[in-house]
Image: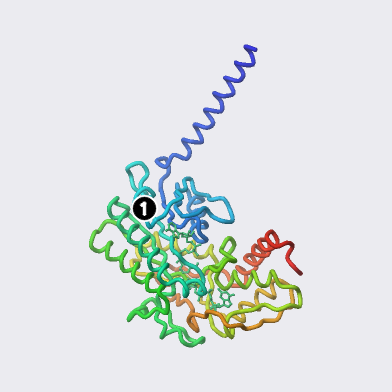
Amino acid sequence: MKRMLKSLLLLSTLCAVVTGLQCAKVKPESFAKRALVCGAGGFIGSHLVERLKSEGYWVRGVDLKLPEFSQTAAHDFILGDLRNPKTCEKATLIGDVPVDEIYQLAADMGGIGFIYEHDAQILHNSVLINVNMAEASRKLGVKRLFYSSSACVYPERNQLTPDHPVCAESSAYPAAPDSEYGWEKLFSERLYKAFEKDHKVTIVRIARFHNIFGPEGTWEGGREKAPAALCRKVALAQDGGVIEIWGDGLQTRSFLYVDECVTGILKLMRSEVDVPLNIGSEEMVTINQLAQMIIDISGKKLTIKHIPGTQGVRGRNSDNHLVREKLQWEPSSKLCDGLVVTYKWIEQQVAQKYGAAKK
Ligand code: NAD
Ligand code: GDD
């Protein structure tokens, strides 16, 4: 009995040492950099958390929800609402010291079907998040903040035709975005820059993302964007069947794979570039071409049926002149490469939820 107790004691001491080591390992102070990712339960945010962690950061995530499709990689995760200024302050501080970097990706957002139908909600929620995060960063002395803006800031007048949309950074003004979502992004760009100029506390870096896609993005429910929506429709379709797409399919877009986006974010954040930059692909396709690429990847024979649906601007493409010049960054892969990975992932999701994918 005595020997057994002794062994138990030894075992528990060993466990305590191991646990202690593990705790010591994840102490934020022992990391060279500490980052807060706002929107870490979302698509790009969860990928960004993983990358930062793999680069040796201590990472805290904050979001209304945990990532839907995988476990968060964050060392620490706060389930909280950034419309509440107290949550923003709590998330920014480790003890009484601010995080070194904030990546602000939290927003009420979705594909075009969602953003055209929720103007008041989007303006209300995202403005509150950004006002609170700008103020928390200033008040608590955060050195650097990344803000995720959007291609939706560009004027509608330059995106009326499918062939030659103009989305150079300098074309954002005179402002005339086609959606309230775009106006909110433009306002928040200005808000962060005004805080940077007047308070001289937080250096701000801003990217305008152009339709980001990849595994672990929303693929159903109304917030999904075209790549995920079309992957889902193709995965659900019977071989020889039909998929429906909104509009005549001649509208154009470009799509950027999520890993490329994360690389772009980090390059921009670590640069001296103080103006907003596009982070997107210049490989513009029609939505019909996008659909056909996905159909080809699936190996099925499907017909495209055009139905009424929200279309947004007629044409949009990233203009990467400035980002190439300033960051020497551009996407390294083709649209098709990212679609292969994304289709496979969505096909699995569909199979898990609705039964084996139909071939
Ligand atoms: P996402 O919807 O997957 O992630 C946003 C996250 O913000 C969500 O997890 C959501 O729960 C969280 N959030 C919303 N309201 C919140 C609140 N009040 N408090 C805390 N968290 C809240 O979107 P995403 O695709 O990962 O986009 C990330 C950012 O990039 C967003 O700001 C978006 O507007 C911007 N952006 C994305 C794209 C794209 O194609 N994905 C294009 C342009 C801009
Ligand atoms: N979502 C979706 N679902 N779009 C479809 C579908 C479908 O089933 N079928 C065709 N489309 C067409 C839309 O009509 C639109 O013309 C085009 O595909 C692209 O739609 P989305 O991917 O939903 O949005 P977007 O490119 O217009 O805008 C998105 O990208 C912006 C940045 O470039 C949105 O996600 C914005 O929130 C984002 O900021």
Where is residue 190? Give x, y as percent.
31, 69
Q: On screen, 67 above or below 20? A: below
> Dot 1 corresponds to which residue?
88
Q: Please give the name of the residue rendered at 75% of the width and 68% of the height, measured from the top-left corner.
A: 358
Where is residue 324? Give x, y as percent.
44, 72
Out of 243 and 308, give the one closest to the viewer: 308
* Quarter of the image that includes the C terminus: bottom right
Position of residue 21 in the picture relative to residue 177 (left or right) = right
Residue 332 visible somewhere in the drawing:
no
Q: Residue furthest left?
A: 198
Q: On screen, 217 above or below 49? A: below
Q: Please give the name of the residue rendered at 38% of the width and 66% of the height, measured from the top-left corner.
A: 124
Where is residue 155? Give x, y as percent.
39, 81
Out of 221 and 287, give the one closest to the viewer: 221
User: Dot 1: what SS?
Assistant: helix
Position of residue 61 in the picture relative to residue 202 (left or right) = right
